[in-house]
Image (cartoon, rainbow, N blue to C red):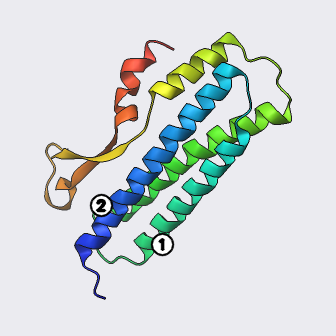
Amino acid sequence: MRLTPVTRAKRFFELFNKQGDIVSETLTELSKSLLEGKSRHARLRDLEHACDDATHEIHNLVNNTFATPLDQGDILLLASSLDDIVDLGEETADKVDLYRVQSITDAAKEMGEYLAKARCHPQARKRERPHAAGRDRRPVLGCQGCLRAPQMEGHL
C-alpha cells in the first residue's frame, strides 16, 4: 500500500480535530463537575489518556513524515498545548478529590461556565498570514474557542 503526502496531511488534521473534541469534552465535564459539585475525575482521567494517545500519534506522525503540512515545531506545539489543557482539567478534578472539597465557590462555578463556553476546535483557517512570503503563506491553524478568548476576557 502506497501512502501519499495528502493522506498524511489529512491525518494530521484528523488528529487535531480529535484532540479538539477531547478538549471540548474535558472542559464540559470539568464545568459540570464544578457546577454540580460532583466528582467526574474518572471520566476526566479517561479523556486525559485518550488525548495523550492522540498526542503520541501526532509525534510519531511528525517523526515519520518528510513534508508536513505545517511547520513541525508548530504541529508539536499545538498538539502539546491541547494536551496540556486536558492534563490541567484532569489535574483539577484530581485535586478536588484529593483534598475532599465539599463545596465549590461561586467564583469556581462561574469559571466552570466560562470553561464550557470556551470549546476548542482547531481548524485550518482559509486565510493565509498577511504579508507572508514563501513557506510562511501556509494556512493558519486557529482554535475557535481561543479566537473568542479576547471577547470573553471582559467577563472574568
Residue drawn 41% across the image and 59% down it: 15
Label 1, label 2: how far apart the Cα atoms are: 15 Å
Q: Earlier in the sequence, mark 1 or mark 2?
A: 1
Q: Please state the horizontal and vertical placement of residue 5, each as a whole percent of the image.
A: 25, 75
In the rendered structure, are the residues bearing label 1 and label 2 in contact, judged by CB atoms less than 8 Å apart?
A: no
Tell me the amino acid under the disc marked 1.
Answer: Asn
Residue 68 seen in this snapshot: no
Residue drawn 85% across the image and 31% down it: 99
Q: Secondary structure at mark 1?
A: helix
**Looking at the rendering, in which quadrant would you find the N terminus?**
bottom left
User: Looking at the image, is mark 1 or mark 2 nearer the viewer?
Assistant: 1
Residue at the spot of label 2: 70
Locate residue 122: give its quadrant: top left
In the picture, the disc for residue 60 is: 1
**Disc 2 residue crowd, few under 14, some 14–19, many 20+, Cα 10 Å:** some
Locate residue 39: give its quadrant: top right
| In the image: residue 138, left or right of residue 62 | left
Q: Please state the horizontal and vertical placement of residue 57, each as a whole percent of the image.
A: 49, 67
| In the image: residue 142, left or right of residue 83 | left
Tell me the amino acid under the disc marked 2.
Answer: Leu
Q: Please state the horizontal and vertical placement of residue 61, each as a whole percent of the image.
A: 42, 71
Q: Secondary structure at mark 2?
A: loop
Q: Please state the horizontal and vertical placement of residue 92, each as a whole percent of the image.
A: 70, 35
Q: Is residue 27 or residue 58 the one in the foreground? A: 27
Q: Is residue 120 above or below residue 57?
A: above
